[in-house]
Amino acid sequence: MNRKISDSFEIPPASVHTLSAIGMIISVTVYDKILIPILRRATGNERGIKILQRVGIGMVFPVLSMAVAALVEKKRLRVVERDYTRREKWDSIDECILVSSSVCCCFGIGDGFTLVGLQENFYDHQVPDSKRSLGIAFYLSVIGLGNF
């Protein structure tokens, strides 16, 4: 994969996943500053939409991410198949890293909805006090396992 952004800068492979965090920061900011005021007027709810609706919207984004990843991989395999007989040495494919980074951004946007919504769910009075710490422990375990 071509990781060069310019002649003098090449993105390190491990830093591609920072785009997920950037997508999450952007989605949380847009949600808080733009969507909540609009949704408050539309629904009359203080939060704009219900917490579980927010989590549900966040669950749609990983599905979209997988669809985008499948399309990107399909394109990448076509390039490999087309160029397989022409190359002697395989250093990288002439696909820009920004194409596949859209998958990471989409996951980050989904995390902005899902993870923040789940945290609100457990810290708010949606969960009984006796189950709150257990729920937060499961929530954090899921994040840890997912990242692993």
Image (cartoon, grey):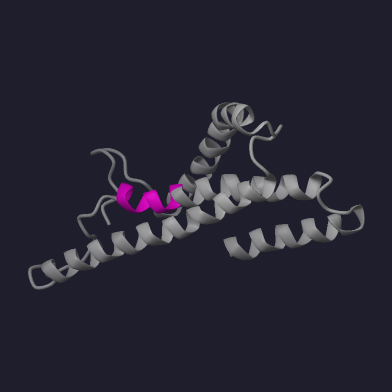
Residue 70: quadrant of the picture: bottom left
State the count of labels. 0
Q: Which is more toward the observer, 6 or 60?
A: 60
Check the image and name the residue furthest to the right. Answer: 130
Query: At x 72% / y 48%, what residue is drawn?
Result: 119
Q: Which is more toward the observer, 15 or 19?
A: 19
Most common SS among magenta residues? helix
Q: Is residue 13 left or right of residue 140?
A: left
Check the image and name the residue furthest to the front. Answer: 43
Query: At x 54% / y 43%, what residue is drawn?
Result: 24
Q: Quadrant of the N terminus?
A: bottom left
Q: Is residue 72 left or right of residue 57?
A: left
Q: Position of residue 16 (x, y in %)?
A: 42, 50
Q: Is residue 98 left or right of residue 25?
A: left
Q: Position of residue 49 (x, y in %)?
A: 64, 40
Q: Is residue 129 left or right of residue 110?
A: right
First to last magenta residue range:
97-105
Q: Quadrant of the C terminus?
A: bottom right
Task: Please say whether residue 15 is visible from this viewpoint.
Answer: no
Q: Position of residue 73 (x, y in %)?
A: 30, 64
Query: At x 59% / y 63%, what residue is drawn?
Result: 146
Task: Please say whether residue 97 is visible from this viewpoint.
Answer: yes
Q: Which is more toward the observer, 100 or 113?
A: 113
> Is residue 45 placed above or below 148 in the rendered structure?
above
> Is residue 37 placed above or below 90 in the rendered structure?
above
Query: At x 24% / y 63%, what residue is drawn?
Result: 76
Q: Can residue 74 be found in the magenta stretch?
A: no
Q: Position of residue 112 (x, y in %)?
A: 58, 44
